[in-house]
Image (cartoon, rainbow, N blue to C red):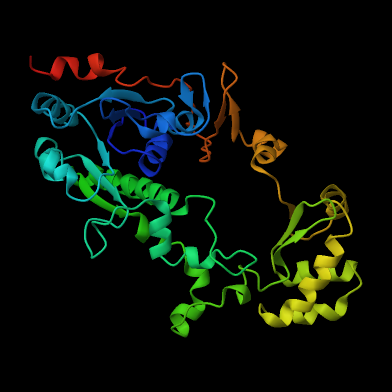
Amino acid sequence: MKLEGLRVIDLSLFLPGPHLTLMMADHGAEVIKVEPPGEGEPNRNMGAKEGEFSVYFRNTHRGKKSISVNLKDAAEREALLKLCETADVFIEAFRPGVVDRLGVGYAAVAARNPRIVYCSIAAFGQNGPLRDLPAHDLSTEAFAGVVSLNLGNDGEPTMPHVPAADMAASMLAFGGIMMALFRREKTGLGDYIDIAMHDSILAWTPNVLGEVFANKRPPVVKHERTFGGSAFYQIYPTKDGRHVVLGAQEHKFIRNLLGALDKPEYIELCERGPGPHQKPVIEFLRGVFSQKTQAEWIDWFKGRDISFAPVLNLREAFDHPHAAARDMHLVDPEGHEHIGIPIKFTREPGRVNFKLPRLGEHNAELLGPLIKT
């Protein structure tokens, strides 16, 4: 596997860091999860559980090792620093300054191992006026202006339903670490990477910045191409109370559907671009889609070159044959379900190790020889 032989020490908790190191473990890295004594990683006990482990923990920590370390204990901290001498990557997600106070900041770790790639993930990064604010995904999305784009039918901001800032930070951290490891092959030196969830979600907004950068004002959300201002990028209710979407606005799709529905007069309105002038088309399509059930529309669209999709619930999404065909829905020998590996290599593909670590399970193996008694 691509990352075989790489040793990763992960002090992060919750989602961005654990998701990052899950990707690394799935591709062969030895990931050593450092957990606080007591309850350990919080997501061990968050949400639904099957047996000893939560589904959340299972899908962020499979294939990893666990050590429990009290970083305020000098002997345990020294053992962790010795372990860092053998590591390639170190990840932490404390609030800025905490790792320095605990004695495991970049300077302390790099002094032991100049080749280490050290990555800090924080809500707002290591500098700037917001750096010390306590925050998770929602707060960073709010400061980044993204919550203002998620409007319900009442025009009020609604909760973002996937943790976009968490996941954006995870993916950018993964890319940064890979770049630093690649560069290390030439220089022999590691690096320090400062990843902010706020930076990461700002970087995900280029398709909605037209009004913001060109005209120096926030977008009128309901008029924007991807937020409701287009009949062909829209959610429509069906006869049975479910929903379908039209999900692309290329002219050929517009003409194919409106031609099939005998409404060629609406083509020009759609091809003019998004905005309030498309309201008659949206209302027409809303009426059309309300005449059949979701299943009937699935059948109707088969074989037609139109970007259409049913709105599935999450259970249906993982049960869909496409998820199985892409190995994105996996079941372990105990019958527990897992998210699959999204990066598909032809050579040396990733491989899921379904084993989950108990808290501190690998203390004796990894720290025992390093702790002075």
From this view, report whether residue 257 is shown above or below residue 321: below
Q: Determine which quarter of the picture holds residue 274.
A: bottom right
Image quadrant occupied by the N terminus: top left
**x, y (%) of residue 162?**
52, 50
From this view, report whether residue 232 is shown above or below residue 337: below
x 52%, y 71%: residue:
208
**x, y (%) of residue 287?**
85, 66
* Residue 161 seen in the figure: yes
x 29%, y 20%: residue:
360
Going by the image, does 65 lie left or right of 204?
left
x 18%, y 45%: residue:
98
* Residue 256 seen in the figure: no
**x, y (%) of residue 197?**
36, 55
From this view, report whether residue 186 is shown above or below residue 197: above
Q: Residue furthest bottom?
A: 215
- Between residue 162 and residue 264, name the one nearer to us: 162
Q: Determine which quarter of the picture holds residue 223.
A: bottom right
Q: Determine which quarter of the picture holds residue 109.
A: top left
**x, y (%) of residue 180?**
28, 47
